[in-house]
Image (cartoon, rainbow, N blue to C red):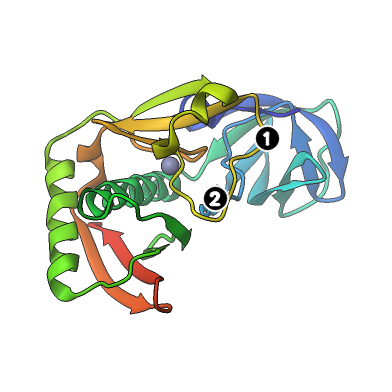
Amino acid sequence: MTELLYLKDSYLKEFNAKVTEVQGNKVVLDRTAFYVLGGGQPADTGKLLRSDEEFKVLDVRREQGKIWHILDGEGLQAGDEVKGVIDWDRRYRLMRMHTAAHIIMIAIQELFPDVKVTGGQLGLEESRDDYNLPELNEGIIRKIEERANEIVQAALPVEIHELPREEAFKIPQLFKLRDVLPPKLPKIRFTKIANDVNACGGTHVKNTKEVGRIKITRTKSKGKDNKRIYFTVEP
Ligand SMILES: [Zn+2]
């Protein structure tokens, strides 16, 4: 099992690890700070260094229960000691986008407490989330955006906590996704921003202030009870 270092410290930019398995240009490490594709968040990119030899990390995926770093070339061998370096500018922007998604959800649930997320995708330029909202007009959009930016300005800590699975399931507000069950893990990890709790295995900034100004760029109706909100954070 690869230890996922970003779950404990999302600000870790470099780490040392050992290669435990190799298949062509794909390697498994004993530990990694590279975010693994999932939950609507793209995988991290960056590089693995074996002394001064460099292998670019193009993607990181979970396949057959293992976490594979997909490299731009072959050559690493099981047992090799490597240094991992994350493309930090890219990851930090995704962390700001990801935290913005949580903040927008807080703003939406203040207006519509029963709304859930029905899908989403983070991007570097623009991100989107879908909600089972019956309606979404200009007035509501501006209200959500304004409230989201108040939360940014309030400089609230983004805390990370864990609860045993059975305890977590007693708190329905933890689970914001309508159609996706949490992974079958003994502990459920969640963020806490003021009173909001949100089960999530992604990477977040540690204070809402770091997100910067949130802008809702456009919306799209995906059906009677499904509305898509596109958003971005200031460069
Ligand atoms: Zn999250």
- Establish if 129 lies above or below 228: above
- Establish if 219 lies above or below 60: below
- Coordinates of residue 180 in the picture (x, y in percent): 57, 51
Ligand 1: which quarter?
top left
Sequence-earlier tag: 2 or 1: 2
Q: Residue at x 52, y 37 (%)?
A: 201
Tell me if I can see residue 10 in this picture: no
Q: Quadrant of the C terminus?
A: bottom left
- Coordinates of residue 28 in the picture (x, y in percent): 77, 37
Q: Residues within 10 Å of mark 2 (few under 14, many from 20)?
A: some
Q: Amino acid at mark 1?
A: Lys
Disc 2, SS: loop
Q: How many marks?
A: 2
Q: Residue at x 16, y 34 (%)?
A: 155
Q: Residue at x 86, y 40 (%)?
A: 22
Q: Quadrant of the N terminus?
A: top right
Q: Residue at x 48, y 28 (%)?
A: 170
Say which residue label 1 marks: 184
Q: Looking at mark 2, is its residue's CB closer than 8 Å to ligand 1?
A: yes
